[in-house]
Structure formats: structure tokens, C-alpha cells
Amino acid sequence: MNPPPDGTRKQPDSQRPVPALRAGDPVPGLSSWLLERKLGGGGFGAVWLARHAIDHERKPVAFKFCTDPDARHRLVTHERNVVARVMQHAGKHPNIVPLLEYNLDGDVPWLMYEFVEGGTLAALAEEWQALPLAKRLGRAVKVLHQIAGALAAMHRLNPPIVHRDLKPANVLMAGAVPRITDFGIGSVALPQGSAPELTAGAAKLPTDMLRSGTKLYSSPEQRFGAPPSPRDDVFSLGVIAWQFVSGDASGQPGTDALAELRDLKVPTELASLIVRSTAFNPERRPKDGGEWEATLGALIARYSSQPETTDTGSPSKPYVASTADTERTEGHAPPRSNRPKGETG
Ligand SMILES: Nc1ncnc2c1ncn2[C@@H]1O[C@H](COP(=O)(O)OP(=O)(O)OP(=O)(O)O)[C@@H](O)[C@H]1O
Ligand SMILES: [Mg+2]
């Protein structure tokens, strides 16, 4: 696009240059907060830790800056309403990171979240891989139950709020409590639809999806441009559960999944949920997070009344959830690689 001759016409959001973000600088459009350090970045832009400039008693916060031009365009044109609803509803749930404030109108739109210090569930799940199956299952079920509770609450809203980018990297650990972040903006960080690439013959995934490592968790219909549905999140939850149970952090359940879960002596109701949730046909999946919450809740109640096993890792032992189930472990083990991998991401 040629610049306007007199420089007066406003450029579209996606074309405007993004001011650089530097440690020590004020947050663009909000001088009361100072950038401290960059925490990382994804398909959406960059996340920074920031501190209040004057009130040093205030807790630090995490600013998510939308610097990616396409994501910026989607955020400010289509997703304003979603962001407002997320701020209104999601922050009230203990397993969702509250969105404290946002500004979608500046050159760098941002979302201000509570800062959660404990690292991501992806890192914690890596630690779990060193554990014998029964212990790994116990910890996974407790965390999955809380995540499912948060999803169920958002899915019950009318209209539902769908996460659309649920993955272990988007669950932050506040001690033993999982808190989902990026709620509702998955549709922003990821491009909508890839139909042109499909018609070209190969189901090529959009670059943003590849880059963010999200494709493992995205439902087939989401990849191909379907509108958001709670069943997208159910698919993601099924993949996450499969990874936790199988110990393979980059895998997806394949056609033998049910048999493999049976071999691992995974409780039938959990095995069935995983398989149904990752069905290609969305109609075959649970309709929202509610069934996951109820099933895992019942499983925890059932097993918590039993004494804890002295775990040897024998696959014949059933899963037992104990109060120690959410504790962190020492040491790491390489992921299991005895089953077909999904696409890596
Ligand atoms: N509220 C928060 N508190 C603490 N750390 C956070 C917070 N939000 C994000 N982070 C961290 O900032 C980094 C970047 O997050 P970001 O969401 O941009 O990347 P991502 O989750 O890998 O990708 P995606 O764009 O798909 O969500 C990650 O390490 C993430 O854990
Ligand atoms: Mg994220």
C-alpha cells in the first residue's frame, strides 16, 4: 500500500508499525505500569512481566501484547466482544487466570492478566513422565478435573466462551492449582480456516498454527475453518489427557487408542472419554466440558476412598488419586516413544 501523500489518512491497524517494547519503558498507553522482562511469545505477540510504577505494593502483572499484524487485525475487528465477556466471566473462576484490564485501541493492543509464577502445565507434565503410571494418572486426573471444571463453566454461558487454544502451555500452575490462560482469544492467535490450502490438495496447516505448536490440540474442523464450538475444547482436553496418561507429550491417540488405554489399565470411563473426545466427527464427542468434570469428579471420589498404593509402576495397578497427587516431582525422564506421534508442534 502506498503511503497517503499528505500523511493524514489513518493506516489500517494491521499496517501500522508496532512500537518496540523495551525493559524499563512504560506500557504503551498505560504509563503507570513499567515493563520489566519479556516472559515469552506465541502466535499472538509477546508477553511481558510488568510492575506498577508508583505503588510497589501492587502485585506484578503479565501484559500480553498483540504485535502480530494479522492477530491484531482479528482482535480489534472481530473479537472485542469476546474479550469483554472473558473479562466479565472468566476471572471469577479459580482455574482461569483473570483478565484484569485491556486496551484494544492503541498501536499495540494489550491484555493485562494476573501474573502466575509457577510455570506451565507443560513443564509439570514433563516432570510427571518420571513417575510410575498410577502416580502419573493420579496427578493428571486431579489437574484435568479442575481444567474441565473451568471449561464447563465457560461452556455453560450463553453463548458459550470457547478457549480454542487449550494446551499444556496455556495452563499456568499457581502452586498445585492449574489456571487456564488465553481464554477466548485462541481464535485470535490462530488464523481462521485454511480452506484454500485444502483445495490445493494437501491439508496444509496455517503457519501460525505450526509455529505455536497448537496443531496437535486443535480439532479437525477448527483446522479447516469451522466456527468455534465447545467441542473444539473437548477435543483439546482429550489430546492432553491422552498425553498425560500415555506419557507421550507430543502424541495424539491413534486408532488403537482404546486397546492401548485398556493395556495401561486406565479406568474405563476415562479411556472412553479420551477416545470419544478425540473423535474426528464432533457429534461423537461430549458436547462440552461438563461430562469431563462430572466423570473425573466421580473417579476422584471413588478412588480417594481407597488406601494409597505403594506404587511400583506396575500397569496392573489401578489409578489412585491421593492428596500428594498434585505435588511436584524431582527429575525428568524422556518421553515414551512407543506409539505413533501426532504431528509435532
Ligand atoms: N499470566 C501469566 N503469568 C505468567 N506467565 C505468563 C502469563 N501469560 C503468559 N505467560 C508466559 O508467557 C510466555 C508466552 O506466552 P504466550 O501465551 O504468548 O505463548 P504460548 O502460550 O506459547 O502461545 P499461544 O500464543 O498459543 O498462547 C509463556 O511462557 C507463558 O507461560
Ligand atoms: Mg499462551
Image (cartoon, rainbow, N blue to C red):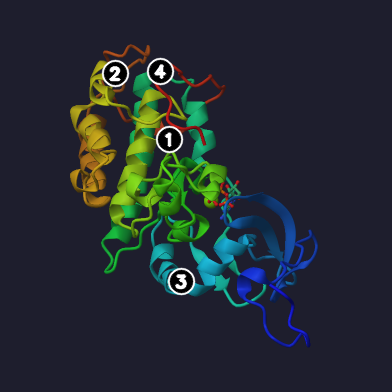
> Mark 4 falls on what kind of element?
loop
Q: Is residue 182 left or right of residue 158?
A: right
Of the two numbered discs 3 and 1 on the same chain, state the one appearing first in sequence. Answer: 3
Of the two numbered discs 1 and 4 on the same chain, state the one appearing first in sequence. Answer: 4
Provide residue 141's location: percent of width, then percent of height. Answer: 33, 35
How far apart are the alpha carbons under marks 2 and 1?
21 Å
How far apart are the alpha carbons under marks 3 and 2?
44 Å
Circles 1 and 4, Cβ within 8 Å, touching? The answer is no
- Which numbered disc, 1 or 4, marks the residue closer to the eye? 4
Of the two numbered discs 3 and 4 on the same chain, state the one appearing first in sequence. Answer: 3
Amino acid type shown at disc 1: Thr
How far apart are the alpha carbons under marks 3 and 1?
38 Å
> Which residue is found at the position 75% from the left and 62% from the top?
21
Determine if the C-beta at disc 2 is less than 8 A from ligand 1.
no
Provide residue 289's location: percent of width, then percent of height. Answer: 27, 50
Circles 3 and 1, Cβ within 8 Å, touching? The answer is no
> Mark 2 falls on what kind of element?
loop
Does residue 200 appear in this view?
A: yes
How far apart are the alpha carbons under marks 3 and 4?
46 Å
Q: Which mark is residue 132?
A: 4
Amino acid type shown at disc 2: Leu
* Residue projecting furthest to the front: 200
Is disc 2 surrounded by few (<14), some (14 to 19) or many (20+) residues within 10 Å?
Answer: some
Of the two numbered discs 3 and 2 on the same chain, state the one appearing first in sequence. Answer: 3
Residue pointed to by mark 1: 326
Residue pointed to by mark 3: 78
Q: Quadrant of the N terminus?
A: bottom right
> Mark 1 falls on what kind of element?
helix
> Mark 3 falls on what kind of element?
helix
Does residue 108 appear in this view?
A: no
